[in-house]
Amino acid sequence: MNSDPLNPYAPPQTDPRPAPPSTDRLEPVLGGVTWPLTFHFKILTFAPKVIVRDATGREVMHVRQRLFKLREHVELFTDSTRATRLGEIRADRVIDWSARYSFTDAEGAPIGSVGRKGWRSMWRAHYDVFNPGDQKADFAVTEENPFAKVMDGIFGQIPLLGLVTVWLFHPRYAATSISTSTPAMRLTKLPAFLEGRFKLDLLTPLPVRQQMNLILSFFMLSLLERRRG
């Protein structure tokens, strides 16, 4: 609307009303994070769990995996108190090469999903990431240096030698937008003892829901690739 209705060339008036607050419950979780994020896999615990922290050390997410489930079921919380549930991850079938993992928030609204490319991932890991409602993949996650993962998997299990390999081999995985071929995020394994550590970098701005979709996709990737060695 013009500031002067009699002057069609007058600059438009600004709307004095404040913008409505965001109703997306993921906004408080990711809206103020400082990238990169770090995944801390606690491997010396009875129930597998992961703590996600941002660059300031703030806990962004606490992930706990349910044991003795034929189908993967992972619960998401905002922190280690587990007082506030953030969402969950469920597999569409008993775990196999082609399982697809769906992400929902605490209210059951879809966040997205990820699936591994079966035999195509034998040498170089390849995952497809889908935004809610999309039948074709929106992002492709590929392994940038598969040789590093092979060396890390082989020598990392050997006593003493494994202490050296954690500093030499750093597998990396990149998510790229299929429509624009733009790199979106990159996951890098970090050297660590008595736990698994991965750094996740945001390479291009994304809406909060797409950020969370990729974060959870990379979480499942790191969990599944760790099982492969």
Image: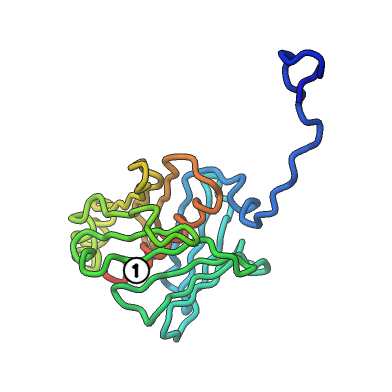
Q: In which quadrant of the rendered view does residue 141 lie?
A: bottom left
Percent position of residue 28, x then y: 65, 51
Q: Is residue 181 above or below residue 226?
A: above
Name the quarter where the N terminus is drawn: top right
Q: In which quadrant of the rendered view does residue 195 lie?
A: bottom left
The residue lying at 19 percent from left, 63 percent from top is: 155
Nearer the observer, 122 or 129? 129
Nearer the observer, 202 or 37? 202
Q: How many marks?
A: 1
In the rendered structure, which amino acid carries the disc numbered 1? Leu
23 left or right of 49 in image: right
Name the quarter where the C terminus is drawn: bottom left
Percent position of residue 100, x then y: 39, 70
Q: Is residue 101 above or below residue 30?
A: below
Percent position of residue 131, x then y: 47, 57
Q: Residues within 10 Å of mark 1 (few under 14, many from 20)?
A: some
The residue lying at 47 percent from left, 74 percent from top is: 90
14 left or right of 125 in image: right
Nearer the observer, 168 or 36? 36
The residue lying at 81 percent from left, 31 percent from top is: 16
Nearer the observer, 68 or 216? 216
62 left or right of 180 in image: right
| Residue position for label 1 | 224
Q: Secondary structure at mark 1?
A: helix
In this picture the colour scheme is: rainbow
The residue lying at 45 percent from left, 55 percent from top is: 214
Q: Is residue 145 above or below residue 94?
A: above
